Image: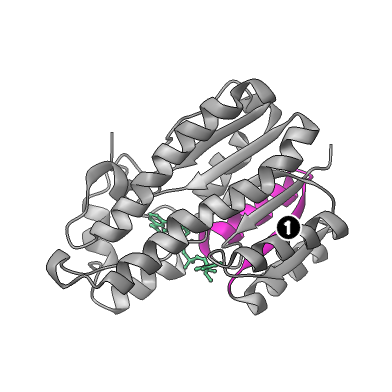
């Protein structure tokens, strides 16, 4: 069955890989990203592979823009029954230097942006009596992360949001899960390495039991499964894809 999937942050990294996996599984895909050019590029790649896809530029923190984005998806593809929230903003600062503005922006993108997307997608899922929500969180929320309090706290709240929505909608055919990645090679990771925030790849690999970095495709494979009918008995879960870094 061809369902409509919305992927926030779909223009890059694991969101982009997820768009391809969901398309490969026969879904129509709306690629939503702050970077509209990237969203359009990914949508074009998908269409070239025969997937019905649109690119939508929107900032997940902007409620009116998100309302317009979901309305566009509904009119051009149909009601949304799969939602993946991959849009995220990394943050790094010693706690005592952390500005209120930096705290607010990271929470706005990672948590409030996820809230907006969920609240705009759930009505279509309730009407369909079927839905899949997969939020991308972070292993920093499981471990705690020094000098990343705002980022880790915003992602920790995503774990709680997952469990709360899972319980609220379990009997209505909607499952809600999250994936906390770690050690996934993406543009975000490369930017952090270039800024000296993350160590070089060899050093990161030394802390990954499986012995190599993961890719966006590793995340996309789990999202693909969680979005399927087969995963219908899995809800409220935090499922690490991290090479064994967090057990
Ligand atoms: N790479 C890792 O190892 C890792 C580890 C833990 C968690 N994560 C999380 O995984 C998710 C995806 O990260 P990635 O590594 O693929 O990064 P990425 O930078 O490659 O992709 C993130 C995308 O989100 C988009 N985005 C950012 N802010 C947005 C906003 N306000 N509105 C709409 N779109 C916005 C960006 O334009 C970008 O296309 C993020 O939520 C990130 O926090 C990544």
Residue 20 in the image: state x and y as whole percent. 67, 55
Q: Is residue 6 left or right of residue 3?
A: left
What segment is highlighted magenta in the picture? 13-34
* Residue 190 seen in the current view: yes
Does the magenta segment cover residue 17?
yes
Q: Is residue 162 left or right of residue 79?
A: left
**At 38% from the left edge and 71% from the top edge, which residue is drawn?**
190
Q: In this picture, is 212 found above or below 44?
A: above
Nearer-the-camera pick, 71 or 44: 71
Does the magenta segment cover residue 162?
no
Which residue is tagged 1?
Answer: 70
SS of the residue under disc 1? helix
Task: Report the coloring of the rendering.
Answer: one colour
Count of numbered circles on the image = 1
Q: In this picture, is 241 found above or below 186?
A: above
Nearer-the-camera pick, 74 or 222: 74
Q: Is residue 60 left or right of residue 121?
A: left
């Amino acid at each position: 069955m061809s369902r409509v999937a919305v992927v926030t942050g779909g223009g890059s990294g694991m969101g982009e890989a997820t768009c391809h996996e969901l398309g490969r599984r026969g879904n129509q895909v709306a690629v939503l990203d702050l970077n509209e050019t990237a969203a359009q590029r990914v949508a074009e790649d998908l269409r070239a592979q025969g997937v019905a896809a649109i690119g939508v530029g929107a900032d997940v923190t902007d409620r009116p823009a998100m309302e317009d984005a979901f309305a566009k998806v509904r009119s051009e593809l149909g009601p949304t029954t799969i939602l993946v929230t991959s849009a995220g903003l990394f943050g790094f600062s010693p706690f005592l230097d952390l500005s209120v503005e930096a705290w607010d922006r990271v929470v706005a993108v990672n948590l409030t942006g996820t809230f907006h997307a969920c609240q705009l997608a759930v009505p279509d899922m309730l009407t369909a009596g079927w839905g899949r929500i997969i939020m991308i969180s972070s292993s920093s929320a499981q471990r705690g992360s020094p000098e990343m309090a705002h980022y880790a706290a915003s992602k920790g709240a995503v774990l709680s949001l997952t469990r709360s929505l899972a319980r609220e909608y379990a009997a209505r055919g909607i499952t809600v899960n999250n994936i906390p990645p770690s050690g996934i090679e993406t543009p975000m990771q490369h930017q952090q390495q270039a800024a000296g925030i993350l160590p070089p790849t060899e050093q990161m690999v030394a802390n990954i039991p499986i012995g190599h970095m993961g890719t966006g495709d590793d995340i996309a494979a789990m999202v693909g499964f969680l979005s399927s009918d087969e995963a219908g008995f899995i809800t409220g879960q935090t499922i690490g894809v991290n090479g064994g870094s967090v057990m």
